[in-house]
């Protein structure tokens, strides 16, 4: 109800007195009576709770809408402990993302602290090749980002994977368990060593409605390639050979996403003449491993880690957008290389090398695309999944690509994420979801 008046100076002023809901702490809200005094361009707010005036604010601008998604982010390091504070302010969080080094994820005391901080949250996370906390990148740390949604429901599921041959079925199992009314997006984290990421994405996409988007990534183990871990559930346990995903339900959530690389191709295109799934045997009817070693020169002794510096670009058709593939392992006896995703017979492959400036430009380009997808406004949260190969190339300049993302999305956006063994996303909002390597993939979430 509003009451209009005019003062002796001829200025109109209005008092409205309506019960409204206001946020009253983490994920909570109460109904209070608010009297709003409009006097020219000034606005005064009187909050009445229990018959007494609790607070008065005077402003020369319209009150800014309180964002519905509440976030808390903490990082643990061996040298500094928890910063800026231990987790636990948002105890009613429904979801917490947990990214950290493999050994850190196995620390029972840290795991117990996270479970106690967010007792009702689904904990989704994985081991990494580097953790993103704001614009800082660190190794062997633990970054926890808790989310408290106002109008979005979340549900998490996990499944074991027996090996790369089980990837398609694993994707199907997860998709079928998450499918339901109101599902708008799925974020998935997978084992990084025992999976065919292309088949995992295929299994997910085949069993989800066409308007449901999928993003995520493959867990990492630094440059070691020994063991990767995924956690999905409320107990915080991180396990190998696991894939976990969370579904977001409700039309109040806006999701943006994009994936871009920035590598330069070199050398001739070569035809893949022998392969099986994600295992490559021959290029132009020559041993692919021997050909790869020729290009790598002295770096060949450090395979598979050195392969991150020289990924393969795959083109399936004339004019099609190439996808990039990174080596996960080599088999000297079989003279084969296992990649993170499919390397089909009949595709054309070309070696790639790093270009520092283009790598950073790729991250900025992905940020712009994801920013525009949510209405060119700063999102509440951006989850960055960038390939370990980019980190190895950029070295001490690695934070430059994260800082580039910050410049596009703005200071109000919380940045979290990790360096991975593979990235899952469409290139752009109109493209189909694919597994990528050597890209910066960004997923933005905004709830209004």
Image (cartoon, grey):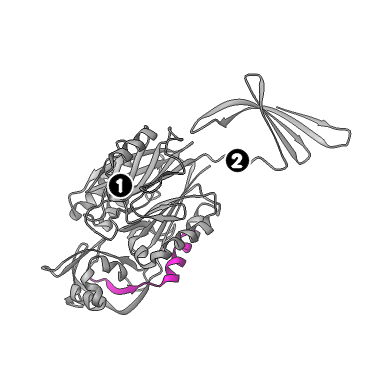
Region of the chain picked out in magenta, as a range: 345-367
Q: Residue 88, how many percent across, how many down?
A: 43, 35
Q: Is residue 392 left or right of residue 447?
A: left
> Is residue 429 depicted above or below 104 in this figure?
below
Q: From the viewer's side, name the closer residue of 151 and 110.
A: 110
Residue 118 appears in the picture as rendered: no
Instruction: Look at the picture and state if 212 lies above or below 421.
Output: above
Residue 33: which quarter of the image? top right
For label 1, the residue is 104
The numbered mark, 1 or 2, whose residue comes first in the sequence reads 2
Spot the residue most to the left.
333
Q: Quadrant of the N terminus?
A: top right
- Frontmost of labels 1 and 2 is 1
Quarter of the image for residue 56 reads: top right
Q: Residue at x 30, y 47 (%)?
A: 104
Q: What x and y, as percent, mark residue 61? A: 70, 43
Residue 214 lies in the magenta-colored region? no
CB atoms of marks 1 and 2 within 8 Å: no
Q: Which residue is mark 2?
A: 65
Within-10-Å neighbours for mark 1: few <14, some 14–19, many 20+? some
Q: Secondary structure at mark 1?
A: helix
Seen from the viewer's position, the closer of residues 363 and 199 is: 363
């Amino acid at each position: 109800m509003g009451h209009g008046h005019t003062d002796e100076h001829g200025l109109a002023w209005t008092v409205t007195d309506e019960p409204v809901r206001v946020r009253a702490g983490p994920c909570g809200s109460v109904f209070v009576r608010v009297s709003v005094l409009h006097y020219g361009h000034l606005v005064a707010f009187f909050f009445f709770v229990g018959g007494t005036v609790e607070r008065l604010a005077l402003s020369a601008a319209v009150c800014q809408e309180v964002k519905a998604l509440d976030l808390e982010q903490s990082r643990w390091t061996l040298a500094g402990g928890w910063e800026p504070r231990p987790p636990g302010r948002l105890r009613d969080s429904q979801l917490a993302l947990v990214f950290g080094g493999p050994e850190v994820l196995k620390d029972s005391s840290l795991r117990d602290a996270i479970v106690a901080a967010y007792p009702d949250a689904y904990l989704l996370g994985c081991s990494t090749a580097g953790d993103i906390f704001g614009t800082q990148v660190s190794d062997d740390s633990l970054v926890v980002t808790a989310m408290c949604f106002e109008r979005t429901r979340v549900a998490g599921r996990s499944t074991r994977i027996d090996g790369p041959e089980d990837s398609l079925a694993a994707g199907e199992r997860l998709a079928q368990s998450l499918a339901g009314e109101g599902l708008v997006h799925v974020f998935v984290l997978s084992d990084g060593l025992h999976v065919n990421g292309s088949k995992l994405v295929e299994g997910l996409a085949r069993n989800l409605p066409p308007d449901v988007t999928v993003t995520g990534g493959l867990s990492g183990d630094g440059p070691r390639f020994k063991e990767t871990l995924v956690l999905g559930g409320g107990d915080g346990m991180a396990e190998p050979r696991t894939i976990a995903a969370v579904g977001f339900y409700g039309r109040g959530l806006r999701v943006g996403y994009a994936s871009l690389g920035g590598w330069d191709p070199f050398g001739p295109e070569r035809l893949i003449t022998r392969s099986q799934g994600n295992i490559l045997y021959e290029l132009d009817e020559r041993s692919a491993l021997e050909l790869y070693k020729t290009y790598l020169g002295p770096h060949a002794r450090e395979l598979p880690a050195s392969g991150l510096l020289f990924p393969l670009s795959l083109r399936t058709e004339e004019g099609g957008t190439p996808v990039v593939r990174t080596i996960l392992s080599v088999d000297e006896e079989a003279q084969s290389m296992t990649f993170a995703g499919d390397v089909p017979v009949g595709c054309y492959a070309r070696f790639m090398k790093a270009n520092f400036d283009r790598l950073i430009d790729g991250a900025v380009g992905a940020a712009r695309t994801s920013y525009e997808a949510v209405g060119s406004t700063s999102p509440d949260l951006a989850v960055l999944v960038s390939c370990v190969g980019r980190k190895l190339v950029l070295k001490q300049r690695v934070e430059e690509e994260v800082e580039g993302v910050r410049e596009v999305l703005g200071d109000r956006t919380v940045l979290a994420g990790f360096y991975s063994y593979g990235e899952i996303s469409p290139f752009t909002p109109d493209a189909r979801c694919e597994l990528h390597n050597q890209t910066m993939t960004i997923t933005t979430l905004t709830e209004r």
